[in-house]
Image (spheres, helix red, strand yellow):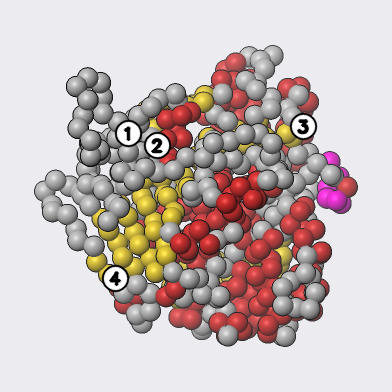
Amino acid sequence: MASSAIAPTSTSFIKKNDLGLSSFYSSPAFSVQRCKRNVSKKICSVMAPRQSERKPAATGSVKTGMTMTEKILGRASEKTQLNPGDNVWVNIDILMTHDVCGPGSIGIFKKEFGQNAKVWDREKIVIIPDHYIFTSDERANRNVDILRDFCTEQNIKYFYDIKDLGNFKANPDYKGVCHVALAQEGHTRPGEVLLGTDSHTCTAGAFGQFATGIGNTDAGFVLGTGKLLLKVPPTLRFVMDGEMPDYILAKDLILQIIGEISVAGATYKAMEFVGSTVESLSMEERMTLCNMVVEAGGKNGVIPADATTYKYLEDKTSIPYEPVYSDAQARFLSEYRFDVSKLEPLVAKPHSPDNRALARECKDVKIDRVYIGSCTGGKTEDFLAAARVFHASGKKVKVPTFLVPATQKVWLDVYTLPVPGTGGKTCSQIFEEAGCDTPASPSCGACLGGPKDTYARMNEAQVCVSTTNRNFPGRMGHKEGQIYLASPYTAAASALTGYVTDPREFLQ
């Protein structure tokens, strides 16, 4: 057993056990193996790591195994050994901000460093307008203006601007959702530290780097210094093996995990994903997995870089990078094992991402709309998945179905890439035949509500199946709206029936 962490000293080690779905659901179908050892009640007092097999040297300290997260932070802080709970000054490789938090971060930077101060490195700051873009709201528009003025003043190299709100295609620099754009533009690299003023910055952990969200004050400090004081998190390890059923997506995997450990289960912890299932995932699916670790309270999510990672980055960055991997003797706070071959399509019912249920158990839930988009579920492969369900059914949707590509590139893919097994049809053709709304301008859209005129915002108390990441009251607009989080497969199947629907109804 790879796990090696400790529980309250008054209790004995918990044996590895098998928990059938009957532990959570009415019918057993999916087995989970959870390996957990005792952990100190104090965050900063995780038990001293095991020594290596060799005998300790007569002088000097003995090096012990480290996790990926510990190694990345160790390198960035110029330390050879780190333990969970250590506070270290970390050198930042990339700082990202957007139109919601950028103005506040800029204001703090100017207040603390001076009105004429210069940022620490104009080529390591990435500024991406994406949240409140296609709106007539003057304050939202002003935020983008503030970003533009700052980037001009500081000569920021990577500013993905938008000026013509009437036609996003007239803005060649505009990208869309920051977390997807960061990857597409080559800003996500193994072994690096990426911080962003957005909680879903953890998405970039899919590339084998430390990526986490920070607040405006921290971002203002990083703008001026390129450094930040960070506490080293302990690591939870999730081992996922087994062949993925063809009706399951990464969204189902992360909903299963969050349902297992709760929205507080990974609070200020790293979540490391390994196993044959993870190795088989595409980069976009890995991004989905890491994207929602914050919904479990996680500090960061991370996946070891491999050939899939390197292939994705080939034509996206020329900056050299050095991946790191957890040592065989690394200490993990807990280890969870999943047989993915037995997993069924899932949803998270209102009003929490850990309110997990089988999609088939919610078949009587009538819905009013479906939303496919966001950093979680608005990538190219998400739309290809939805199109597969629509094409397999040959039917039209029964509820309004909104499509919001994450970025300009995703939007272009929707209109140009053939969907496998459809005789060359594109996603856009299939969506039109199914009666979906025309794919909208790329942005965060209604994922987090936004101004009243935001496309597809829930301005009424409706029930929505969504490929987004949060379903708290008011998240997509109306405070009485009900949001069922689901994979693109499940979202598309639900659109076709007008009820929460297991996609196997159309894929088998």
- For mark 1, what is the residue? 83
Mark toward the start of the polypeptide (2 vs 1):
2
Q: Which residue is mark 3?
A: 148
Residue lying at 58% horizontally and 30% vertically, measured from the top left: 93
Indicate which disc, 3 or 2, sits on the residue closer to the N terminus: 2
Identify the residue under disc 2: 70
Q: Which mark's residue is nearer the viewer, 3 or 1?
A: 1
Tell me the quarter of the image containing the N terminus: bottom left
Instruction: Assign a secondary structure to mark 1.
Output: loop
- Residue at 34% across, 68% down: 32
Q: Is residue 371 above or below residue 263?
A: below
Please tell me which of labels 4 and 3 falls first in the chain: 4
Q: Quadrant of residue 29?
A: bottom left
Q: Residue 53 placed where, x, y %?
A: 23, 39
Of the residues under marks 2 and 4, which one precedes in the sequence?
Answer: 4
Could you tell me how far apart the alpha carbons at marks 2 and 4 are, in whole angstroms? 30 Å
Residue 501 in picture, x, y percent from top left: 56, 80
Looking at the picture, how far across and down is residue 456, in whole percent? 70, 62
Q: Magenta stretch: give its range.
A: 162-169
Amino acid marked by disc 3: Arg
What secondary structure is found at the residue carrying circle 2?
helix
Instruction: For marks 4 and 1, give the CA distance.
Output: 31 Å
Q: Which mark is residue 19?
A: 4
Closer to the chain start, of discs 3 and 1, is 1
